[in-house]
Image: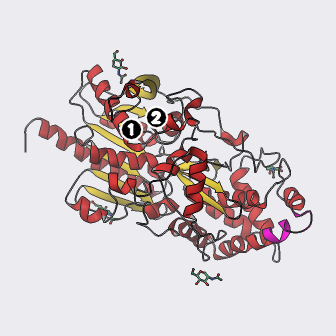
Amino acid sequence: MSTCLLCLVLLFFSVVAEATYSPGGFHHLSSLRQKKKASKSKPELPFETRYFPQNLDHFSFTPESYKVFHQKYLINSRFWRKGGPIFVYTGNEGDIDWFASNTGFMSDIAPKFRALLVFIEHRFYGESTPIRKKSHKSAETLGYLNSQQALADFAILIRSLKQNLSSEASPVVVFGGSYGGMLAAWFRLKYPHIAIGALASSAPILHFDNIVPLTSFYDAVSQDFKDASMNCFKVIKRSWEELDAVSTKKNGLQELSKKFRTCKGLQSRYSASNWLSGAFVYTAMVNYPTAANFMAPLPGYPVEEMCKIIDGFPRGSSNLDRAFAAASLYYNYSGSEKCFEMEQQTDDHGLNGWQYQACTEMVMPMSCSNQSMLPPYDNDYEAFEEQCKSRYGVKPRPHWITTEFGGMRIETVLKRFGSNIIFSNGLQDPWSRGGVLKNISSSIVALVTKKGAHHADLRAATKGDPEWLKEQRTQEVAIIEKWISEYYRDLRGEN
Ligand SMILES: *[C@@H]1O[C@H](CO)[C@@H](O)[C@H](O)[C@H]1NC(C)=O
Ligand SMILES: *[C@@H]1O[C@H](CO)[C@@H](O)[C@H](O)[C@H]1NC(C)=O
Ligand SMILES: *[C@@H]1O[C@H](CO)[C@@H](O)[C@H](O)[C@H]1NC(C)=O
Ligand SMILES: *[C@@H]1O[C@H](CO)[C@@H](O)[C@H](O)[C@H]1NC(C)=O
């Protein structure tokens, strides 16, 4: 998942190609991204960068546990006054700068709340790697990469920061998107004494242990395209047959490489089909109402734009040509690609620990039904397990997340436990199917937008934002305001 919104991990098997998407939306084992497109150039962020010495292991007292690594965090105190609220982004599977630059909502609302802004990088991602270079190779060290350690890191860092600022009574609100949103919600549930509330945007906390159907993710991708144009859906659905027909011909891969303008000759037709699928999946995730550059630069409502390309071809055109032209919108909207790199792995956002997390605790199995727009596949759990064993020497623990954090019958559980969590989702985002979409109690609420995409609400406001998005953010601000004023009232001992 050099992709992540719950990172996409593409696992290539000899026969089937199976995708594991990071909520961040990244392909891990094989990136669909282009090297150059990566917008490596980091935008100037109004943050100071700091490093906090963090213990490797918070849950034992063995000598090894006292090893220290430096956890990066970003801080902006321009709007803050002592005693005021602290807004913390609970970092997910990538460079924290990348999330900070795609979470403008927090900066937008900081002046109103006079809040301190803090973005904490997740351990083992970006620069916060315990053992330089080696940290993704050694299974022994990788064992310390998990969500519980990450939550404890956040708790320890926040306490230290408040102490250093002599502002221990400041209310803390946590924010997160995708896996970061899961962390924000779980943080509120596990550390209610540290955070007074959480905004968990596009957090698929129900994507575990068969709580939602395995086909739901790809069903949602298909629905997005159907909503844009039924013809578009059909063209893409039919294009896979044509892809197979071309590639199984004599010199078929050569012909396909030419057709798809690949930089190097294709070794496998699965690379081409994953490249196409990736474009449709990621575009569904980032189907934002205005132009944005999260995974790649794209126009507003890019799914509709793709479908316009497909529907605009003359009658009788090949479905594969149309699908390729549509996918090119995702990979070449800037118009700067000379050729497409389909078999080269890249990791533009420091996401490469997600594969390991997907092989241990973040087990989110998927399958693709034959009603879907993408090539159907069954979930092959045994093959996945084998991959994890051979790659990292670990066996996935598919029930751990629901044991540690819950998820089964979440409504009845959280109805009588917990408070102050906003679960926001946009239904365009395929991850929304694994999100909390119903209000649970008066303070555990679901804000759902029909046209929203992957944590659209966390993005900076822009001039072209539609009313429903403005409305969603206004509602979030009002709820957070309420949490904070209740907190101060409690602090003063009022009822
Ligand atoms: C708080 O101050 C101590 C001592 O200077 C420092 O080691 C630590 O990193 C600081 N905490 C944070 C969160 O920056
Ligand atoms: C990318 O777009 C530009 C401008 O439309 C075009 O000239 C170029 O051929 C495209 N690249 C590929 C690989 O299709
Ligand atoms: C599609 O899948 C369903 C359920 O798995 C199965 O009953 C049906 O035969 C399949 N249809 C085709 C055309 O493969
Ligand atoms: C949850 O409640 C809020 C009001 O508190 C409402 O605006 C929102 O639409 C409700 N969400 C759902 C999914 O019904």
Residue, disc 2:
123
Frontmost residue, 61 versus 159: 61
Q: Nearer the viewer, residue 281 or 367?
A: 367
Q: Does residue 441 sit above or below 298 in this rendering?
A: below
Q: Residue at 52% of width from left, 50% of height from top? A: 359
Please say whether residue 245 is one of the residues in the magenta stretch: yes
Q: Secondary structure at mark 1?
A: helix
Identity of the residue drawn at 68% across and 76% down: 234
Tell me: 303 left or right of 425.
Answer: right
**Left or right relative to 210: residue 135:** right
Please state the horizontal and vertical placement of residue 375, each as a whole percent of the image.
Answer: 67, 69
Dot 2 beta carbon under 8 Å from ligand 1: no
- Between residue 212 and residue 16, name the one nearer to us: 16
Q: Earlier in the sequence, mark 1 or mark 2?
A: 2
The structure residue drawn at horizontal position 28% and vertical position 34%, both measured from the top left corner, is 85
Secondary structure of residue under mark 2: loop
